[in-house]
Structure formats: C-alpha cells, structure tokens
Amino acid sequence: MMKAAINDRSKDLVFIGGGHSSAIALQLFGLNPLPQVRLILISDTLKTPYSGMLPGHVAGFYSYKETHIDLQRLADFAKAKLYLDRAIGLDLANNKVICEQNPPLAFDYLSIDIGSTPDTISVTGATEYAIPVKPVPKFLSRWNEILKTASERPDRPLTISIVGGGAGGVELAMNAKHRLDRITDNLKIHLFHRGERLLESHNRWVSKRLQKILLDRGINLHLQERVSEVFPDRIICESGLNVECNYIFWVTQASAPKWIKKSGLTTDSQGFILVRDTLQSLSHPHIFAAGDIATMKDYPRPKAGVFAVRQGQPLFENLHRILRGETLKPYIPQKQYLSLIGTGDKSAIASWGKFGFHSPLLWLWKDYIDRQFMNRFDRT
C-alpha cells in the first residue's frame, strides 16, 4: 500500500453503530488521537448494551446503567461528533452514508458495527406479533412492560413463548424465569427449538445439562418443533402443536438489514458484509466492518459477542494504520472459544470444545470479566 501523508488534508472516519468493536475502537482513538482526522459516530441510541450482561439484567442482577455504554460520553472522549440517527443506506459512488433524518454524511473511511437481528421474515405473523431480542432497546422496552404488568396483576396468568434454542434463547428462558418467579406464581414459559438438542454448536454435555436445568425449573421445552405461524395470542408449529401465550420472544438465527446488500457491498448469503482478515470489505477496502454484521471470508465464526469484543483492538489498529497510509495487519480469530452461559441463578456453565462445567464460581468469574469490560468505559 502506498503511503499518503495524513496532513495532505483532513479525513473523515465515520462509524455506523456503537457495537462492542466500535466502542473499543472509539475509546482507543480517544487515547491515541490522529491530527486532521474527524471522527463521526452515527447511532440510533445513546446507550449501547453490552451483550455479556444483558441476561443478568433480565434476571435483575444488573441495573440498566451497569449494562450499557454511554455513547455520548464515549464520543466526547474520542472527540467524535455523534449523530443520533439511523443509517438506512450507502451512496458508494460518492462515499456518503444515507441517514433517516440527517442529510447524507460524507466519509473517506467507514466502519460498520450495527449488529444483527433475528430472522422473522420466513414465518407468517412473526414480524407482526413476535418480539425480537434485537435491537435490544426495543426488546428491553417490551420486557419492562411485561415486568410492570406482572407486578400490577400478579394473580393474572402469564405465559411466555421463546422461539430459538441457541444460547440466547436458553439464557433468556432461565433469566426471565428467575425474575418473573419473584413477581408472580402464575408463570409458564415455553421454549421452541427446531433442532434435536439445545445449543447444537456446543458439546452434548452442555446441551444435556441445560435441558435438565430448564426442565427442573418447570420450563416447557419443545424440541424438533418448527414454528410455522404466529398469532397475537398463540404459536402454531408444523407438527400441529398449538400453544396459547401472552408474549412471544424471537431468538432465532441472525439476519442483516436489507440496506447492506442493496448498497453494493459484497455480502454472504445472509446479507452480512464479507471482510478480509484486515476487517476490510472485500469489495470496498476503504470500508471496514466488525461484530455480527461482518463475516470473515477466510475465518467464519459464530455471531457471538466474544468475537465482536476481540475485533475491537485490531479494528482500531487497522483504521489507525490506513489513516496514516501504513500497511494493515491481518487478524486471525481463534477457532475454539470459551463460552460462559449464565443459568439465571448466579451460577454459570463453561463450554470449551468437548468440555463443560457448571458452578457458581464460574458466575463470579464471568461477573468479574464483564465488569472489567464495562469499567474501561467508566474511565473515559
């Protein structure tokens, strides 16, 4: 790559989304500023959630403040201009971000970290009646409504259905049960999963352990059930299973916003931005992507928060390098990774390759790791 002096003219680096990778990169830019580089952050929320602590927030173990990064404070620290807006498209011919409210914003370099949303399009009624767990602010708004209603009418029967038997759906079931059991005695929770076992990407011990925990706590588990239709008050499966419920949470396979693919960026089959090991777009090397919205072409990994966190440092380093006209460094994510799955009772399961372990000590360890991550932003 040819070097270009950074003082030739000022450059605009625009961040779309305040996800984990973006937040880390912005903090590091605050600690390592570059002259004549203007930073811009576009986010549709002023507080961005940390996924590692959200299940604990649902359970009531953490407050809203403890689980959210203040983007205005972070932007001020990084000397970035914050636009409270939603990106809805890209004009790649003119290097501009199309926003919902503001005029198009020009960029020299762009970094996208907007996460993902559960795919509800393929199931009739899901888009209209189900509550996706992402975007998180909308999910938490509905969750707080449920808590308020349950508190006001604890005698009223409450039935919640959760669609998706991955880590997100299972953690939601366990933590929601913990919280609501302290409010009402009339709670029923149903968990639907189309696979033969829970958390199929993890080892069988972890799957069996979580299945036992769910059943021991009275959560109704429906394995090998594919939801075919959603109504305001019920779920219908292909098998004919018909379950009445008050609320339906959707925690299925992730999908990307349609505008990403429409913009002309090269994507994978699900619409996620394909990136090189430098986190640059395959088709537009002046555009970077990280977190759930990105798929590393040579090193595909699950859409998990652990990878978004670990991409933060290499994202910053390569953005810093490209702005200085220097050669970028490859980032190779690890193949195996440790998952710590909270079980809703201040205990946790560790999943690592073929190994699994369940202990309250693991919750203490997870709590320490999560608080250390959040504390870094309190120091900005």
Image: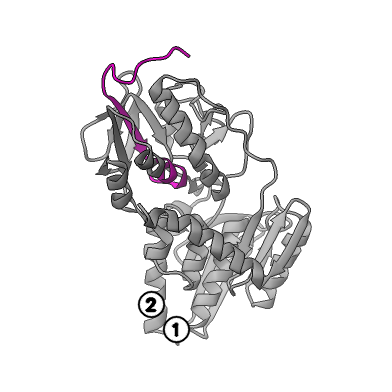
5 within the magenta span: yes
> Where are the magenta residues, as a range?
1-25
Q: Position of residue 368 (x, y in %)?
A: 55, 63
For residue 149, which numbered disc appears in the image?
2
Asked if residue 125 can be seen in this view, the reply is no
Q: Residue at x 59, y 75 (%)?
A: 345
Asked if residue 52 can be seen in this view, the reply is yes
- Tell me the element at label 2: helix
Q: Tag 2: Cα neighbours inside 10 Å, few (<14), some, or many (≥20)?
A: few
For residue 156, which numbered disc appears in the image?
1
Q: Residue at x 45, y 84 (%)?
A: 156
Q: Name above or below for residue 321 compared with residue 173.
A: above
- Tell me the element at label 1: loop
Q: Position of residue 47 (x, y in %)?
A: 34, 55
> Between 297 and 89, which is closer to the camera in this rendering?
297
Q: Is residue 153 left or right of residue 40?
A: right
* First in residue order: circle 2 vs circle 1: 2
243 within the magenta span: no
Q: Name above or below for residue 367 compared with residue 288.
A: below
Please tell me in which quadrant of the rendered image residue 172 appears. bottom right
Q: Position of residue 116 (x, y in %)?
A: 48, 45
Q: Amino acid at mark 1?
A: Arg
Label 2–label 1 contact, CB within 8 A: yes
Q: Residue at x 43, y 54 (%)?
A: 376
Q: Amino acid at mark 2?
A: Thr
Rounded to the nearest angstrom, the CA distance separating label 2 from label 1 is 9 Å
> Between 228 and 159, which is closer to the camera in this rendering?
159
Of labels 2 and 1, the one closer to you: 2
Please tell me in which quadrant of the rendered image residue 206 appears. bottom right
Q: Tag 1: Cα neighbours inside 10 Å, few (<14), some, or many (≥20)?
A: some
Q: Name above or below for residue 140 compared with residue 156.
A: above
